[in-house]
Image (spheres, rainbow, N blue to C red):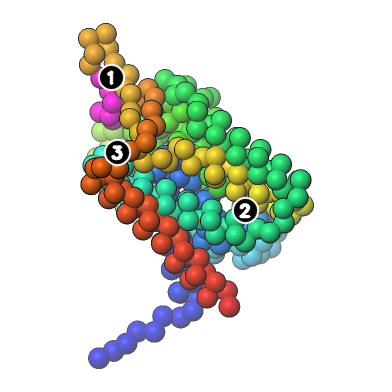
Amino acid sequence: MIFFKISNHTQNMLVLFLKGIAMGAANKIPGVSGGFIAFILGFYEKLIHSLKNINYNAFSRLFKKGIKSFSDYINGSFLIFIFLGVIFSYFSVSLLLDYLLDNYETELFGVFFGLILGSLLIIANDEKEFNYKTITALFVGLSLGLAISFLKILPENDNLLFVFFCGIISVSGMTIPGLSGSFLLIILGNYSLLLVDSVNSIYYTVKDIIQLNFDFLNDTERIHLLKIILVFTLGSVTGLVLFSNLLSYLLNKHKQITNFLIIGFITGSLRTIWPWKTKFFETLENGEKIYNSAGNPIIKDYEFFIPNFNLIGTWLVLLFIFLGILLVVFLGKYGEKKNE
């Protein structure tokens, strides 16, 4: 029997790829952020500082000293495998999450609620520096998180300038723990347009090109969606540059205050991931639901409620919350061992 030994470098790259998949999956869940996953898995600061280094100096190195100097400057191998995981997730794990959101939404939100709750307990236990500055930061973060969770949902808008703005806002979920890009897209009315319709248009276009079928060039709806995803991507890149530079500065100059701000923000945004909620949909005068182009009913608002503890289903969701807490504790212990 032949045993294959995987080198440490290969193992590290595989772990980065899996972390990217986790980030991408989290970005798909309304109320959860990829930045939060980076935060609890211990590579948040490295991600922010690496993204911040994608600047004029980096490209100057690329043209003057070559690709290796450019890659070393921006921590290229780290970013490549993280974002390969994120991209892979959108076309694999995200499809499973779509199914779970359609059929087991309350249970799925229970798991993520447990993940966030467990993470807060661990992070708060690690932070000992309580003073008026950190307590103020905690309160500001808590207030902002709660305020965002109470925002009303806007109608869908495919104006390209607005789509560019959505790109800037949505990518905040990858850089700011607790700020869910997908939830913000729901608030902005463009979740289905940008994370369902447009992503699907890329999939079908790639499939058509592989099959040498170029009929999509005459499909005005497909071309429109491809323009939208291009503008959305440009907005996302712009947002990455803006947020990564801002957060890198804050983590370098005011790390303790920034951490407490993040803890407060995550705590305030817990409301958005509360498993028990009722959806209200846009309807016509006769009461029929209004559907978007993806065939999904358009959500108008949410109403959160306390569950009935006499129901077995409630205890099942509580079990999923507990499993989420256990998972994040396990990840925390694993991270500690890796750092020893």
Outermost bottom residue: 1
Q: Is there a contact, CB below 8 Å, between mark 1 and mark 2?
A: no
Q: In the rendered view, would you say 256 is above or below 207?
A: below
Q: Secondary structure at mark 2?
A: helix
Residue type (three-letter) at the residue carrying disc 2: Ile
Residue 123, percent across and down?
A: 58, 57
Which residue is painted at 36% across and 41% down in the image? 275
Part of the protein shown in magenta: 289-297
**Circle 3 is placed at which residue position?**
308
Q: Which disc is residue 48 wearing?
A: 2
Which picture quadrant has residue 6?
Answer: bottom left
**Circle 1 is placed at which residue position?**
290
Determine crowd level at label 2: few under 14, some 14-19, many 20+ residues with C-alpha closer than 10 A.
many
Q: CA distance from mark 1 to mark 2?
A: 40 Å
Q: Does residue 327 show up magenta in the picture?
A: no
| Location of the C terminus (image quadrant) | bottom right
Q: CA distance from mark 2 to mark 3?
A: 42 Å
Which residue is painted at 32% across and 87% down in the image? 3
Q: Secondary structure at mark 1?
A: loop
